[in-house]
Amino acid sequence: MKIIKRVCTLILSFMMLISLSNTAMAEENWESLLGTVVDGSVLTNEQESTGDALKVLRGYYLSDGSSYISNEGNNIVYISGSTSCHRTADELRVNIYLERLVNGDWETVTYQHHSEYNTYYAYNGFYILVAPGYFYRTVTAHVAIAGDTVESLTSKTDWLYIG
């Protein structure tokens, strides 16, 4: 019985040592990536980031749009987006996508589509619990619809590390 306890203790100690070294390697790995640009966004350890749509591409209706992400602590992020027009449109859309960087490629974690009608401004935002140990960003599609006219822009934030 004593031998079994010693073997179990030795195995558990070895497993803890391996998990601690993996954690240290993961932390070292993400820190070495800071400042890298992936798909047009910079990897940061900031607490928040805002991204604006290119205003050069604005149209007759669509003026601009923005994306926002903030690290609220305890693996919670707040993401939001807004769409603005020069004049009232029949429909304004704010389609927000939360993306996570996994092995150099991004994947969509969640998304939320939101529309406002007969207005020149639309906003959408929400809190979400995320898995720690990844970089996250918000990408927002901004769409204005007036009759047969459809105009769209995209904005994206920088990547925030949520540890």
Image (cartoon, grey):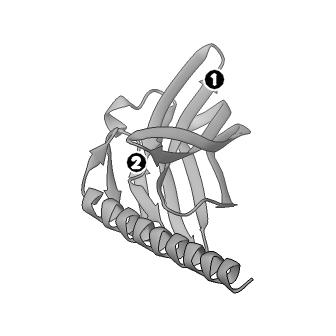
The Cα atoms of the two marked residues, 1 and 2, are separated by: 22 Å
Position of 78 with respect to 56 (left or right) is right
Q: Amino acid at mark 2?
A: Asp
Position of 72 with respect to 56 (left or right) is right
Q: Is residue 157 above or below residue 63?
A: below
Q: Is residue 86 visible?
A: no
Residue lying at 25% horizontally and 51% vertically, measured from the top left: 36
Residue labelled with disc 1:
146
SS at mark 1 in the image:
strand
Q: Is residue 87 above or below residue 12?
A: above
Looking at the figure, which quarter contains the N terminus? bottom right
Residue lying at 60% horizontally and 68% vertically, measured from the top left: 75
Position of 139 with respect to 158 (left or right) is right
Q: Amino acid at mark 1?
A: Ala
Residue labelled with disc 2:
52
Q: Using the image as rendered, state which of residue 138 and residue 6 is in the foreground.
A: 6
Dot 1 crowding, Cα within 10 Å, few <14, some 14–19, many 20+: some
Residue lying at 27% horizontally and 46% vertically, measured from the top left: 37
Q: Spot the residue most to the top.
A: 148
